[in-house]
Image (cartoon, rainbow, N blue to C red):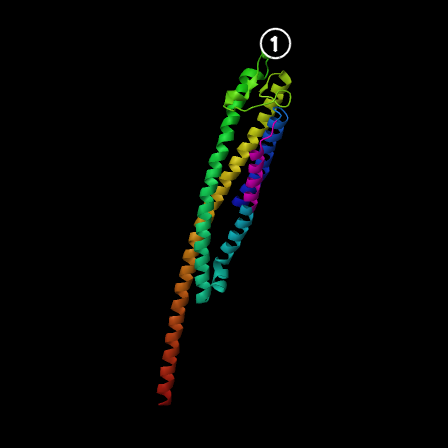
């Protein structure tokens, strides 16, 4: 459930955050597109949906390897071996995905720091300032290390009017919490993956114990059968 909640939170908030950034800030204010950022949004959403499906598979496997269901499903030698292989496979895949989502969480921390920095600029230099104070003030992209060739009249490299500056701060204020919630969603996904790793390790041990119990029961049944046959022969003799 934690993983599913994290996936839903991550998908919804990240989609909205990147939409505000690409459409609201870059396209409407600076009048240029960032194709790779739009592609990144699609990639993250697809990966998150795949994670949702994978969590359902892991949940189903966890139910099959728990309690009475485990005894019914993994009763034969071949079934037990298949269950152990499946547990190892899901453990390895979950571990790899968990490392990948840790990297995603680290990546999402950068927009949060950028949001804090931009909101500091807005609060100290733009918001609640008189019009005369903003005369001659421009917010240039080169201030943040973004240098690009731009065509005068088609796009712009700086925001200079009070309206543009106000819209910029409003978009930043709206996008920041979305990135923060997306970061929280990615952390929930990591916690869910860690929980699944613990569950997979436990299920592997349970299936292994089930195999040992099955072998022991077979040995006991074989011994009882042999004892019964010996007693029957003595009776006939």
Seen at 50% across and 64% down, the residue is 72
Q: How many marks?
A: 1
In the image, is residue 88 part of the stretch drawn in magenta? no
Residue 43 location, x and y as percent? 55, 41
Residue projecting furthest to the bottom:
237
Q: Is residue 172 above or below residue 59?
A: above
Report the front residue among 136 and 179: 136
Q: Is residue 112 above or below residue 1?
A: above
Q: Secondary structure at mark 1?
A: helix
Q: Quadrant of the C terminus?
A: bottom left
Give the residues in magenta. 32-49
Please give the residue where the numbered disc 1 appears in the rendered image. Answer: 132
Is 19 displayed left or right of 196 in the figure? right
Residue 175 location, x and y as percent? 58, 29
| The quadrant where residue 127 appears | top right
Report the front residue among 79 and 199: 79
């Amino acid at each position: 459930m934690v993983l599913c909640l994290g996936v839903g939170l991550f998908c919804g908030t990240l989609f909205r955050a990147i939409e505000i950034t690409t459409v609201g800030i870059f396209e409407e204010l600076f009048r240029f597109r960032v194709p790779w950022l739009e592609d990144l949004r699609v990639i993250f959403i697809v990966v998150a949906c795949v994670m949702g499906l994978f969590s359902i598979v892991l949940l189903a496997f966890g139910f099959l390897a728990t309690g009475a269901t485990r005894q019914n499903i993994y009763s034969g030698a071949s079934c037990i071996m298949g269950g152990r292989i499946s547990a190892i496979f899901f453990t390895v895949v979950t571990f790899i995905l968990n490392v990948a989502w840790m990297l995603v969480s680290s990546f999402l921390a950068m927009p949060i720091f950028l949001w804090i920095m931009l909101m500091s600029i807005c609060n100290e230099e733009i918001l609640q300032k008189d019009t005369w104070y903003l005369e001659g003030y421009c917010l240039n992209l080169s201030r943040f290390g973004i240098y690009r060739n731009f065509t005068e009249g088609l796009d712009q490299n700086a925001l200079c009017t009070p309206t543009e500056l106000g819209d910029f701060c409003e978009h930043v204020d709206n996008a920041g919490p979305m990135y923060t919630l997306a970061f929280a969603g990615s952390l929930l996904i990591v916690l869910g993956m860690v929980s699944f790793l613990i569950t997979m390790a436990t299920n592997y041990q349970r299936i292994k114990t089930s195999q040992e119990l099955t072998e022991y029961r077979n040995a006991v049944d074989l011994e009882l059968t042999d004892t019964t046959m010996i007693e029957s022969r003595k009776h006939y003799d």
